[in-house]
Image (spheres, rainbow, N blue to C red):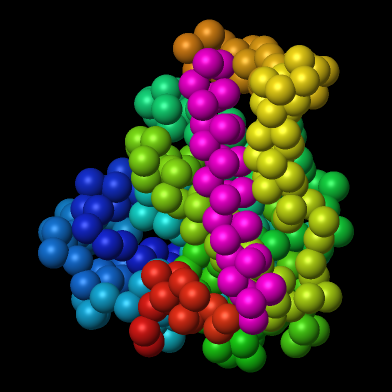
Amino acid sequence: MLFSLIIPVYNRPDEVDELLESLTHSTYKEIFEIVLIEDGSTLLCKDVAEKYGNQLDISYYYKSNSGPGASRNYGMKKATGDYFIIFDSDCIIPKQYLTEVDHALKREYVDCFGGPDQALDSFSDIQKAINFAMTSFLTTGGIRGGSEKVGKFQPRSFNMGLSKKAFEASQGFGNIHPGEDPDLTIRLWNLGFESRLFPAAYVYHKRRIDWDKFSVQVNKFGKARPILNSWYPKYNKVTFFFPSVFIMGFLVAFLLMLFFNIDLLLQLYFLYFLMLFIVSTYQNKSIKIGYLSIIAVWKQFYGYGIGFIQSYFKVIILKQKPQEAFPELFFKI
């Protein structure tokens, strides 16, 4: 089985340098190829690709900007392998990653898999706090952090595997972003393919480096979910509403305290944030990161929750077309 590593990039040559450098340490003994797709960048990574040309089998392509989904599809069409592994450019790959994937596929083959993400010690404190917010069992239920208690796992495209057969049957990613990865996974399920979590196939994912970028990202996640629910109502889950309920509940708690001097609900929120602080401080061995994790979780829930409410009202209640309600979520391809 030939693995083709598909990496779209937009104006991030330094990140690509770190990613490729990490791949030079791979313990995987078989040949694998890397397909770099420059998605209309003005800061090119061609020189970076050439820097590793003697150590790695790299193909470099430049194309006009059309978003990550279309760029991944472009790369998979150019690839020569029969199994594609998709990374975001801000990932660093552990040396055993490909070996773990190879072992997992040989034990029990699946046409689509996803792996979790972790934080490196070299990441900034904000990145570590964001990683905690996105992976902790106290926030996302641990699904993105490697939990195996998932009936039908939806891989995320920063760390995702897809067979050539599944790609050709599905035609790959659609033009929604974010949300292109669950959209593809659900279409694969409907075509009869299966997906699975490979807990040992984790990557180090840098995510966003500041609060503003993180807030914009999670807000878009929230907007995308009701759109996906409208397309695939069969896979709608009550848990998708939790961040919105959390935000509205906090407002109710504040009003109860302000007008009726009832603070029980607000105390429950305080206990939850205290638990976040304690767990994050213990896991990261840092009081500062524990504190920053509270900020990260609040921004995560608030951004996602508000985005979800906006999208639910426009798409589900008013029946607006998603492309007209939120054109910023759709690339023209």
Picture quarter containing residue 71?
Answer: bottom left
Residue nearest the viewer, comparing 20 with 324: 324
- Quadrant in which residue 179 is drawn: bottom right
Give the camera-side residue of 46 and 210.
210
Compared across the picture, whether 215 is left or right of 267 comes to left
In the image, residue 231 lies in the stretch drawn in magenta: no
Query: Main SS type for the magenta part?
Result: helix
For the point 31% across and 62% down, the residue is: 9
Instruction: Report x, y in % for residue 278.
Output: 67, 13
So how many labels did they put on this image? Answer: 0
Q: Residue 310 in magenta?
A: yes
What x and y, as percent, mark residue 310?
A: 57, 61
Decide: is 69 above or below 89: below
**Residue 60, percent from left and from top:** 25, 71
Residue 248 in the image: state x and y as whole percent.
69, 41
> In the rendered image, which quarter is residue 35 located in?
bottom left
For the point 48% across and 12% down, the residue is 288
Q: Is residue 306 in sight in this rendering?
A: yes
Quadrant of the drawing holding the C terminus = bottom left
Question: Left or right of 66: which side holds 120?
Answer: right
Q: Which of the image's four quarters has the N terminus?
A: bottom right
Against 93, is 287 above or below? above
For the magenta stretch, what is the residue range? Answer: 290-319
Residue occupying the far front of the picture: 259
Q: Residue at x 67, y 26 (%)?
A: 254
Residue at 61% x, 41% y: name it.
301
Is 332 rendered above or below residue 87?
A: below
Q: Is residue 81 visible?
A: no
